[in-house]
Image (spheres, coloured by chain):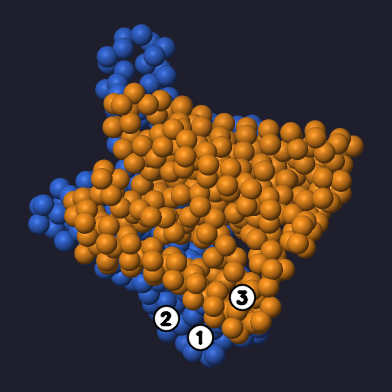
Amino acid sequence: MSVDIQLAPVIRFDPGEAAFGSARGGNLAATALRAGSLIAFAVILVVFSLTAPYFLSLGNIGNVLGQSAISGVLAIGLTIVLIAGGSNVVTGGIDLSLAANMGLSAAVYATAVQLGYGDATAVVAALVTGGLIGVVNAVAVVGAGIVPLLATLAVMNIVAGLELVLTQNTVIPAATPLLTAVSSSGPFGIPVLAYVLLAFALIAAAIVQYTPTGLRLYAVGEFPDAARAAGLAVRRLVAGAFIASGLCGGFAGILSVSNLSGSTTGSGEMLLPVVVTALLGSVFSRRLVPTVIGTLLSTLFVGFLVNGFQLLNISSVLVSGVQGLLILLVVSATTLLRK
Amino acid sequence: MASLTSSTETPDLSRAVIGVIVNNALVLALVAVLAVFSVATPTFLTLANLQSILVNNFTLLAIVAIAMTFAVSVGGIDLSVGTAIDFASFAFVSLVLAGQPVAFAALAGLGAGAAVGAFNAVLISGIGISPFLATLGTLFIGRSIQQLLTSGGNPVYLPPSGVPEAFRFLGRGTIAGIPVPLIIAALIIVGATLILTRARFGRVALAIGIQPSVVRYSGIAVRAHVAVAFILAGLIAAVAGLILSATVTVYIPSSGNAFLLNAIGATFIGTTHSRLGRPNVPGTVLGVLLLSIVANGLLLTGLNFYWQQVGTGLLIFAVLALSFINRRKATA
């Protein structure tokens, strides 16, 4: 019940009005919206499959999953921070360094390969890079008390700069047995990346949604004072969320090296789409809160949308516009339904 | 000034010194950066270079950061300042290319930027969407619209022969030896300072940013003030769009986003200049100065270009850390 009155805390802005609406109206709105967004998802799938025959083939679905793997892993990392950081996007949970983190981790992996190290060393190096960036974020947010939006913005700049220093703004090619294996096709002709995304999402969902630690993350994010009063290690949990997000960035970096056969520049372009995906994810959850599965669904939603547009030869120019409209429609519906 | 209050409780000299340092982190960082670059590079402290900092690094970012300051002052944020810049630039360049008078094209550009702000205002004040999400949506939609208008993202060039004198004057002209863009930026800085500190609107806006419910219970129309703040943000960002396109005589789709993160950085660095951590125009300007000087200074030191971004990031990080640690101590 205490969770219900905090309906959709991430997306509401109501300066000055009481933040506690009627719980019953909230539930109704939440149900309507959740059903609405799932129906919208289904309608889009049906329309695309009717107009583009290839759309619902196993091969194409696998492709969409594979192409969504990198942004999906990043969005799930961001979701963990959203959960632990709580309602306000500016002062609460946000990690702007994720995309840059992926870029640097990928560069570290590719550089390690270039220096003659094996896959094992390179994987560890990339994950340590991502994890360290998470630690810096955690120290800045929890230790120094810097607002996450600013702390991760500054870290993003530093990390993006380090990537440039390391790569001199060039493409670093990398080809190893592991990278080839990850970028190839697995069972049923579906890309291995697709399986990686699903496995990663399931493990993350198991940890975040079904363990005591995950539940505590929600408590810390939604009611930090109550969580502290209940004796939860608030600072340690928030720090852990940022470190987990950093590790996701490192993992996404490895996937990106494999997908692109090396490290390339321009990872920063991923940032805003990933933020939109993670924020949209809460629409696919029962109580309109950020969840791992919700984020996975929202990642696939965007992935299918882009893919369908491509199959129908609709200009990809429209994709970002549709993403923007979607987020506004969804959020407007939430807030209007509550009135 | 504010530093004295905290140092009176601790007679220990070293702690007092630390207090002074922490409370004026932004100003001291500026002084330190100026000193370091003056010693490190002979060309830094020359009139020509200081002027170059103001013209090339400071002007546009200052205007965009002021726009951001208005959005932040009501407790929001505007991720679509780049969209307002781009829309203004597109309208301005396209109309001049079509042979319209420069003044009319400029007005249309300002209107386009204000329209972006008004769209945000409807979403935020009308519907009640959080500013972060509303302006993020605007940013994405704006990107698509620009690509549709330019058949996939082609720049709109003004042929060198077809650039009207007034257009060129806005970007590269001087009045009494002072570059026109700098004069416009100065006027906006002074105007914004007056609005936020002297006008009733500004005081209400800042109050909304601190405690909206109190403002509402005082019988003040919170939503209307929030709406005006976002329209102002779009309008001011549009000015930067006009100057940008007049300087480079071309409109490049989605180029305005380049200012976004630095504008956010400068505005929030600026909040550390206020004892209560509130957005304020002088702080924002100091933040922009800091970013501009560091960008220029690092360039002059001949340091590898890519290390410059790392250096800038580290500096911002240090300033933020100092002031937030201090603020935590002040409230504890």
Depth check: give the residue in front, B145 or A321. Answer: A321
Q: Position of residue A29 (x, y in %)?
A: 29, 63
Can you identify the residue that label 1 sits on? B95
Query: Residue drawn 81% across and 56% down?
Result: A184
Can you identify the residue that label 3 sits on? A308
Question: Counting residues from the N terminus, which is met first, the one under dot 1 or under dot 2?
Answer: 1
Q: Quadrant of the N terminus of chain B?
A: top left
Determine the image quadrant of residue B138: bottom left
Label 2 crowd (10 A; few <14 / some 14-19 / many >=20): some
Give, as a three-letter code, the residue at label 3.
Gly
Query: Residue drawn 46% across and 27% down?
Result: A236
Query: Residue drawn 49% across and 89% down?
Result: B100
Image marks 3 and 1: residues in contact by CB distance under 8 Å? no
**The residue tagged with tag 3: helix, strand or loop?**
helix
Marks 3 and 1 belong to one chain:
no
Mark 3 vs mark 2: in front? 3
Label 3 crowd (10 A; few <14 / some 14-19 / many >=20): many
Can you identify the residue that label 2 sits on? B108
Give, as a three-letter code, the residue at label 2.
Ala
Depth check: give the residue in front, B170 or A319. Answer: A319
Image marks 3 and 2: residues in contact by CB distance under 8 Å? no
The subunit letter for the residue under badge 1 reads B
Depth check: give the residue in front, B45 or A6. Answer: A6
Question: In this picture, is B106 found above or below B48?
Answer: below
Depth check: give the residue in front, B223 or B103. Answer: B223
Q: Is residue B95 visible?
A: yes
Query: Residue drawn 25% across and 57% down?
Result: A26
The subunit letter for the residue under badge 3 reads A
Which chain can be seen in blue? B
Q: What's the distance in space between the residues labelled 3 and 1, CA to CA?
A: 36 Å
Mark 3 vs mark 1: in front? 3
